Amino acid sequence: FSEIPRDGDEAVERRAERIGAGLAGEVDHVQFFDGHRLTDRREPHANPTGDGFAIDHRMRSFGGREAISANGKSTSYFSLLQQVDDWYNVLQEKEIQAGSCGIIQGEFSIGTVSLLIAMLLHKQIIVPLQEQEPEKELKSRIAQCQYEFTFQADGSWDYQELPGTANSELYEQIRFEKTSGLIIFTSGSTGVPKGAVHNANQLLQKFHKQRSGFRTITFLLLDHIGGINSLLAVLSYGGTVIPVKERTAKGVAKIIQDTKAELLPTTPTFLKMILMNESWKQYDLTSLKLVTFGTEPMPDSTLHALEKIFPNIHFKQTYGLTELGIMPVRSPKGDSRWFSIGGDGFKTRIVDGILHIHSHTSMLGYLNAPSPFDRDGWYNTGDRIEEKDGYIRVLGRDSEIINVGGEKVFPIEVEDHIMKLPNIKEVAVVGRSNPIMGKVVVARVQLKEPASLEETEKLVRDHCSQGLSPYMVPAIVTLVEKELHGDRFKKIRQDMQE
């Protein structure tokens, strides 16, 4: 290795391993010749993310296999790890110490992916943010970030030092364990977003067992627990990361066709958009083997339509929360609406119809809010569920359930029924305060073709009267023009007049 710059044994070892991986697939050990003698160190470097599974070691074993397919360019695992090394050197050149807290902002790309892995190896506390982050300053202040890397759409990047001190007891836990950290912010839909601090090594351990890797669309964003989970799974299993820039039904369908993608992790709302847009008629989606969905309940009508149109695709329910990570689930054959949460380190219980979970991948705590766990480590998910034959089904967030004169109305049931009307593009059902009934049902409707409010209200109410209990029939119907979902393609149930 005489041509490798001698900038420290650790750097030489890393480069030697990468070269060896490209030539022979694996390096057993590295020998160094200093001009006088050979030295032999068989354990090149300790697991950089703490005890247990080391993602860079696993990635090295995939050698020339395709790691990322983006913008018509293919990047192998060998090349990806070379870029990881380059970023590792950048972190050292900028004198960023282990245990520092930094932002990585941008979409999934060769740059953001390689930097994120380098930050994991360098034991950083990582704050991933989406490319267009309206609350960047607030989140940076909450996390007390010390630096940031910002990526542009063309792949260029900027570095900036920040005034944060990264002074938190939760950070000290990560530093004490000599591992890396990950901060994922809650949506902040009910107030200030909360920073959930995770031990990154705990999140990685679920991938220690080798499985088959898929060519995967990274639909969920970089700052989403599901997006991070998808990325780590792909790289741990030797799959291919396929970034998507245009999160539209046609844009995603086209990239599935162009890249022969096999796995699409997404949301029920987006799957409904694919159905309505009929992009599946314009593009070849036959490469898809698996579609996973989560973040919100799946309407029965949407799932049945998907299974009818795509009989060769397996649709699988996922379940996860910012505070707990993504959990292993199992569904009965032929019905992915129902599932059970299981596996080592995960326990569930149901208290008054609400799902509680005990997870070994739970966050350490919030940076800016009290711990939501009870003294035994159980977390109240706030999800009201239904049980059947050892499986559960999420009916909706308990906070979204509408109490009409003592009767409980689950928004998804009313929405699913209204969506059967041919001119309905989307609907969100919410509750509105009423002095007599406590709450009444309000249906916020988006139409495919223009129609009057009076006509639409009569159509919706008549239709609901035929298939729903009287207390579930919307008392108020409003027409909306803007989309009823956010940038994460999750339905927004909010009454604009409350």
Image (cartoon, grey):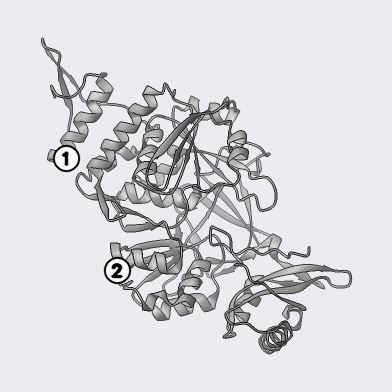
Going from the N terminus, do you reach mark 1 or mark 2 first?
A: 1
Image position, residue 430 (x, y; %): 71, 68
- Residue 8 is drawn in which quadrant? top left
Q: What element does badge 2 sit on? A: loop
Q: Farthest left residue?
A: 36
Q: What element does badge 1 sit on? A: helix
- Residue 110 is drawn in which quadrant? top left
Vertical side of 214 occupied by 76: above or below: above
* Label 2: how many Cα within 10 Å (few below 14, some 14–19, many 20+): some
Q: Amino acid at mark 2?
A: Ser
For label 1, the residue is 22
Please name the residue shown 44% across and 68% down the image: 249
Task: Quote the CA–CA distance across marks 1 and 2.
Answer: 29 Å
Depth check, front residue: 487 or 170: 487
Depth check, front residue: 146 or 186: 146
Vertical side of 293 occupied by 59: above or below: above
For label 2, the residue is 287
Vertical side of 54 occupied by 355: above or below: below
Quadrant of the rendering where the C terminus is positioned: bottom right
Q: Amino acid at mark 1?
A: Gly
Using the rendered image of the protein, determine whether residue 26 is visible from the camera's viewpoint: no
Image position, residue 1 (x, y; %): 14, 24
Please name the residue shown 47% across and 28% down the image: 177
Using the rendered image of the protein, determine whether residue 413 is visible from the camera's viewpoint: yes
